[in-house]
Image (tube, rainbow, N blue to C red):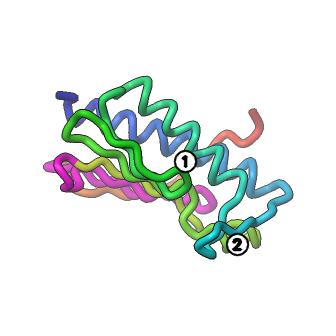
């Protein structure tokens, strides 16, 4: 069973990935598409979640994943990652600042890690079972690579 610190490290790594990819897309030309259910999506939503899933499969191949863009993949362990690559896609597509990436890890359906990453102000909320909640400001995603 993965240690909480391994899961938290991986979740923070996913937040770094989404911050970088979403900011690159946000400063570019964005096109908002609509899914059959009427919800919005962009190429950045799809790219971020695809990348996240690759990282999760590499580190934790037995874990399940439930994502906003690609649905559910059942795992063989008690752990499921719940992902929304860009929460606030309409705002994101309009060039507004109020969008976030949401990452959580559940054990037997109970959240044990949660991250809300807001790249435009450089703010990240992180919560983990037994470790409390923190808010960090001032990180700047590397948008130039």
Q: Nearer the viewer, residue 33 or 114?
A: 33
Query: Which one is in front, 74 or 55?
Result: 74
Residue at the front extreme, as displayed = 36
Q: Viewer-proximal residue, 74 or 130? A: 74
Whole-number angstrom distance, CA of label 2 to CA of label 1 = 19 Å
Mark 2: secondary structure: loop
* Range of magenta residues: 107-130
Question: Split into 4 quadrants, where in the image is the C terminus?
Answer: top right
Q: Which residue is mark 1?
A: 139
Who's the residue at 59% across and 48% down the image?
A: 19
Q: Marks 1 and 2: in contact by CB < 8 Å?
A: no
Residue 21 inside the magenta-drawn segment: no
Q: Residue furthest top?
A: 58
Please tell me the numbered disc located at residue 96.
2
Measured from the top left, where is residue 116 in percent x and y?
43, 59
Magenta stretch prevailing secondary structure: strand
Up-down: is 28 above or below 41? above
Q: Could you tell me which residue is drawn at 19 percent across and 48 percent down?
A: 131
Image side of residue 70 versus residue 59, left or right: right
Instruction: Say if 29 sits above or below 95 in the image.
Output: above
- In the image, residue 64 lies at what x, y percent? 33, 41
Specify the quadrant that holds the N terminus.
top left
Rendered image: mark on residue 54:
none
Q: Mark 2 or mark 1: which is in front?
A: 2
Q: Is residue 13 above or below residue 94?
A: above
- Seen at 72% across and 52% down, the residue is 43
Report x, y in % for residue 137.
48, 56
Q: In the image, residue 66 lies at what x, y percent?
A: 40, 51
């Amino acid at each position: 069973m993965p240690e909480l610190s391994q899961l938290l490290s991986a979740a923070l790594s996913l937040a770094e990935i989404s911050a970088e990819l979403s900011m690159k897309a946000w400063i570019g030309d964005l096109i908002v598409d609509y899914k059959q259910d009427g919800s919005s999506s962009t190429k950045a939503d799809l790219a971020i979640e695809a990348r996240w899933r690759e990282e999760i499969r590499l580190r934790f191949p037995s874990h399940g994943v439930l994502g906003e863009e690609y649905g559910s993949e059942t795992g063989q362990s008690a752990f499921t990652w719940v992902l929304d690559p860009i929460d606030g896609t309409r705002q994101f597509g309009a060039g507004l600042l109020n969008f976030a990436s949401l990452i959580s890890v559940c054990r037997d359906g109970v959240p044990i890690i949660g991250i809300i990453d807001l790249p435009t102000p450089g703010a990240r909320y992180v919560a983990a079972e037994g470790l409390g909640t923190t808010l960090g400001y001032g990180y700047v995603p590397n948008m130039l690579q």
